[in-house]
Image (cartoon, coloured by chain):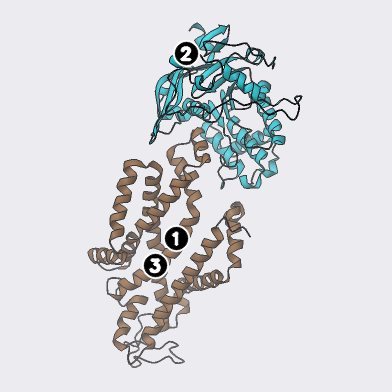
C-alpha cells in the first residue's frame, strides 16, 4: 500500500470473539476498513452486528475475558494499536481517538458536575493548569451550546439532548484526530436528534477530525458521511462512498435495509417491508455467506462458501456472488 | 464548601431533617461529642479523684449520679468515658473502612483470582465470631486504647470488604466507567474518582451503624478486662467493676448501661435515617 500515509485508520482482517458459556460468539469477522483524514464513515448495521465491538477494538477496550481480538491489525496514524503499551494506549484514548456514547443518561458520571467532567478530559491530555483548564472547558461548553452558568450543574439536571452535548464537548475537548460516535442520537427524542447530529457534523468540520459514525439509521448516514460500510452478523457486506451506495446498492441485505425505510408517498394501508427471518446466531454462523439464510437470491454456492469482499466498481466493495441491480429506484 | 458543591449531599440532609428519630439521634451524638471534647470543663471532678470518705454514695446534690467504691464521681467518669467510646468507635470504624474498603474495591474491580483470594480470606474471617476475634486480637496485642481500636477495627473488616465489593461490581459495569476508560483514565483514577464516590451511600450507612457496633465491642472487651485499663474510665469497664455492688448500689451499673444503650440507639437511628435519606427511590 503506497498511500499508507494518507490513511488515518486502516483496519485489516480484524476478528473479535467472545468466549461465553453458550459458545464462542463471532462478533467481528475478518473486517477490513479504511478511513482517510477528515472524512466521515458511516457504520450501519442492526443491533448485534458488531459495530460497537469494532469501535471498542479500535480503542483496545474489549473486555478480556470474555472478549479477545484473535487476529488482524489496526493501524492508526501508522502505528499498530494492538502493539501499543498500556501507557501509549491511555495517551491515545481521548487525545487521538475520542468516543461519544450512545446513552447520555448513563455515560456521564452522576456525581460530578459537567464542568468537572469536561475538565477531566482536558487535564488528562494537556499541560494546561487550573484556571486554564476551566476556561477551556467553558469554551467547549460554549461551542456545543451550553450556557456557562450551567457549568456547575450535575448531569441529572440536564435533558437528554443537553447531556449528549456534554458528551460531545468531552469528546472534542482535546481535538482528537478520530471521533467515534456510537449511535449518538439513538437515545434521544426525534426532535432533538437532528439538532445533535447537526452539531456533531458542524464540529467535525470545525475541529477537522475524522469520524466513525455508528448508527442503524441510513438517513443519518446520508446527511453526515462521505462513505458507508454496511455490517451484517460481524461481516462487512458492502462498502462504498455515499453516491455509489445510495445510488446503486448491490448487496441484497443493503437493498433490504432500503426497502425497510418507510415511504411517505406509499398508501397508508401498505405494510412496511421487512427482511424475512432473523440474524444468525453469532455462536453458530452459517458456513457460507452469513446472509444466505435470509437472502431471496441465495444459490447453492452461497450456502457453501462466503464470497468475500470484491471490488465491483472502483471504490465499491461487496461481499456477494450475485449482485442484483436495485429495483426500488435511486436513493441518493 | 462541600455542601454547596455536592447537591446530592444537600438533598440527603434535607430528607434527613424530616426524619425525627434520626434528628434525635443526631442531637444525642452531637451532645456526646461536645461533652467528650470539653470533658475537662464540664465534668465536676477529675475522673480519678477519690473521695474515700464518700464511697458508694447514692445520687445526691453533690454527686449527681453517685460515687463508686473508691468515692469517684460517676458522672465525671461517664463524661470522660464518652471520650474513649467515641474515639474507639470512630478510629476502629476508620480502620475497618480503610482496610476493608480497599480490599473490597480491589477485589471488585479486578475480579478473577485476586477477587477469589481476597473474598475467601474474608469468608474465613467471617466464620469466626467477630467478638471472639476481637478478644483474641486484644489478648494477643495486650490491653490498651490503641490495641483496642485495632482489635475492634479488624474484626469488622470483612463486612466492609463485602459491601464495597458488591457496590464496585455494580458500578464498574456502568457506561460512565467505560467512558472514563475511553477518555484515557488510568485504573487508579477510575477507581478513586469514578467508582468509589458512586459507592458512598451504602458505605455511609454501614459506617454509622458500625460505630455503634464498635462502641459495643469495646465496652464488651473492657468488661472482660481486655480494653481500657483502670483508672481511666470506660463504660464497659465501669459496668464490670459495678457488678460486685449490683445488690447494694444498683445505680452504679445502671448509669454506664444507660449511657451505652442511649449512644447505640442514637447511632442506629442516624444510620437508619441515612439509609432512608440516601435511597434514591425515595424522592419526596
**Residue B253, image x, y percentages:** 36, 84
Residue under numbered circle 1: B206
Query: Can residue A260 be seen by looking at this rendering?
Result: yes
Query: Can residue A39 be seen by looking at this rendering?
Result: no
**Residue B143, image x, y percentages:** 27, 68
Secondary structure under the numbered disc 3 in the rendered image: helix
Question: Are callouts 2 and 3 both on one chain?
Answer: no
Residue under numbered circle 3: B213
Which residue is located at x 60 percent, y 11 percent?
A: A324
Task: State the mark number for residue A300.
Answer: 2
Q: Chain of mark 2?
A: A
Q: Which chain is cyan?
A: A
- Dot 2: few (<14), some (14–19), or many (≥20) neighbours within 10 Å? few
The answer to whether residue A122 is above or below residue B122 is above
Spatial distance from mark 2 to mark 3, Cα to Cα? 74 Å
Q: Chain of mark 1?
A: B
The answer to whether residue B2 is above or below residue A264 is below
What's the colour of chain B in the image? Answer: brown
Amino acid at each position: 500500500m503506497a498511500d499508507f500515509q494518507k490513511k488515518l485508520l486502516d483496519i485489516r482482517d480484524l476478528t473479535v470473539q467472545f468466549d461465553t458459556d453458550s459458545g464462542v460468539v463471532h462478533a467481528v469477522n475478518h473486517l477490513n476498513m479504511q478511513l482517510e483524514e477528515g472524512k466521515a464513515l458511516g457504520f450501519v448495521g442492526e443491533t448485534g452486528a458488531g459495530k460497537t465491538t469494532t469501535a471498542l477494538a479500535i480503542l483496545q477496550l474489549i473486555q478480556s475475558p470474555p472478549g479477545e481480538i484473535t487476529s488482524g491489525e489496526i493501524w492508526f496514524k501508522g502505528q499498530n494499536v494492538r502493539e501499543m503499551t498500556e501507557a501509549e494506549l491511555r495517551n491515545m484514548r481521548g487525545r487521538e481517538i475520542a468516543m461519544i456514547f450512545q446513552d447520555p443518561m448513563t455515560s456521564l458520571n452522576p456525581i460530578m458536575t459537567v464542568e468537572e467532567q469536561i475538565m477531566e478530559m482536558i487535564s488528562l491530555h494537556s499541560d494546561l493548569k487550573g484556571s486554564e483548564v476551566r476556561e477551556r472547558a467553558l469554551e467547549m461548553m460554549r461551542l456545543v451550546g451550553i450556557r456557562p452558568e450551567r457549568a456547575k450543574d450535575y448531569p441529572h439536571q440536564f435533558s437528554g439532548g443537553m447531556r449528549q452535548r456534554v458528551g460531545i464537548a468531552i469528546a472534542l475537548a482535546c481535538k482528537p484526530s478520530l471521533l467515534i460516535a456510537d449511535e449518538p442520537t439513538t437515545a434521544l427524542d426525534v426532535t432533538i436528534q437532528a439538532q445533535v447530529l447537526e452539531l456533531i457534523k458542524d464540529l467535525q468540520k470545525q475541529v477537522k477530525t475524522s469520524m466513525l459514525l455508528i448508527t442503524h439509521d441510513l438517513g443519518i448516514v446520508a446527511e453526515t458521511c462521505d462513505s458507508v460500510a454496511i455490517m451484517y452478523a460481524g461481516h462487512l457486506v458492502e462498502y462504498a462512498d455515499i453516491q455509489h451506495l445510495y445510488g446503486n446498492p448491490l448487496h441484497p441485505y443493503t437493498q433490504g435495509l432500503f426497502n425497510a425505510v418507510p415511504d411517505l408517498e406509499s398508501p397508508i394501508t401498505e405494510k412496511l417491508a421487512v427482511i424475512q427471518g432473523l440474524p444468525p446466531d453469532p455462536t453458530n454462523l452459517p458456513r457460507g455467506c452469513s446472509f444466505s439464510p435470509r437472502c431471496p437470491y441465495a444459490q447453492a454456492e452461497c450456502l457453501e462458501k462466503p464470497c468475500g469482499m470484491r471490488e465491483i466498481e472502483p471504490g465499491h466493495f461487496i461481499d456477494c456472488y450475485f449482485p442484483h441491480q436495485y429495483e426500488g429506484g435511486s436513493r441518493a | 464548601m462541600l455542601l454547596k458543591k455536592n447537591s446530592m449531599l444537600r438533598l440527603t440532609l434535607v430528607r434527613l431533617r424530616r426524619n425525627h428519630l434520626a434528628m434525635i439521634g443526631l442531637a444525642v451524638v452531637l451532645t456526646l461529642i461536645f461533652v467528650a471534647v470539653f470533658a475537662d470543663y464540664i465534668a465536676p471532678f477529675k475522673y480519678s479523684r477519690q473521695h474515700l470518705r464518700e464511697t458508694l454514695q447514692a445520687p445526691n446534690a453533690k454527686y449527681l449520679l453517685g460515687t463508686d467504691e473508691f468515692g469517684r464521681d460517676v458522672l465525671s467518669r461517664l463524661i470522660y468515658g464518652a471520650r474513649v467510646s467515641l474515639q474507639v468507635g470512630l478510629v476502629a470504624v476508620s480502620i475497618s473502612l480503610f482496610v476493608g474498603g480497599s480490599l473490597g474495591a480491589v477485589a471488585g474491580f479486578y475480579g478473577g483470582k485476586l477477587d477469589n483470594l481476597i473474598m475467601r480470606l474474608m469468608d474465613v474471617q467471617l466464620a469466626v465470631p467477630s467478638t471472639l476475634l476481637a478478644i483474641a486480637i486484644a489478648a494477643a496485642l495486650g490491653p490498651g486504647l490503641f490495641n483496642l481500636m485495632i482489635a475492634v477495627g479488624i474484626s469488622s473488616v470483612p463486612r466492609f470488604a463485602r459491601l464495597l465489593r458488591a457496590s464496585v461490581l455494580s458500578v464498574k459495569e456502568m457506561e460512565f466507567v467505560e467512558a472514563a476508560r475511553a477518555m484515557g483514565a488510568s485504573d487508579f483514577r477510575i477507581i478513586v474518582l469514578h467508582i468509589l464516590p458512586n459507592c458512598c451511600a451504602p458505605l455511609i450507612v454501614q459506617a454509622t451503624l458500625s460505630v455503634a457496633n464498635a462502641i459495643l465491642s469495646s465496652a464488651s472487651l473492657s468488661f472482660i478486662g481486655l480494653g481500657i485499663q483502670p483508672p481511666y474510665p470506660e463504660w464497659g469497664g465501669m459496668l464490670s467493676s459495678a457488678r460486685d455492688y449490683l445488690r447494694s448500689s444498683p445505680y452504679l451499673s445502671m448509669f454506664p448501661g444507660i449511657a451505652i444503650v442511649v449512644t447505640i440507639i442514637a447511632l442506629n437511628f442516624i444510620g437508619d435515617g441515612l439509609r432512608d435519606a440516601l435511597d434514591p427511590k425515595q424522592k419526596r
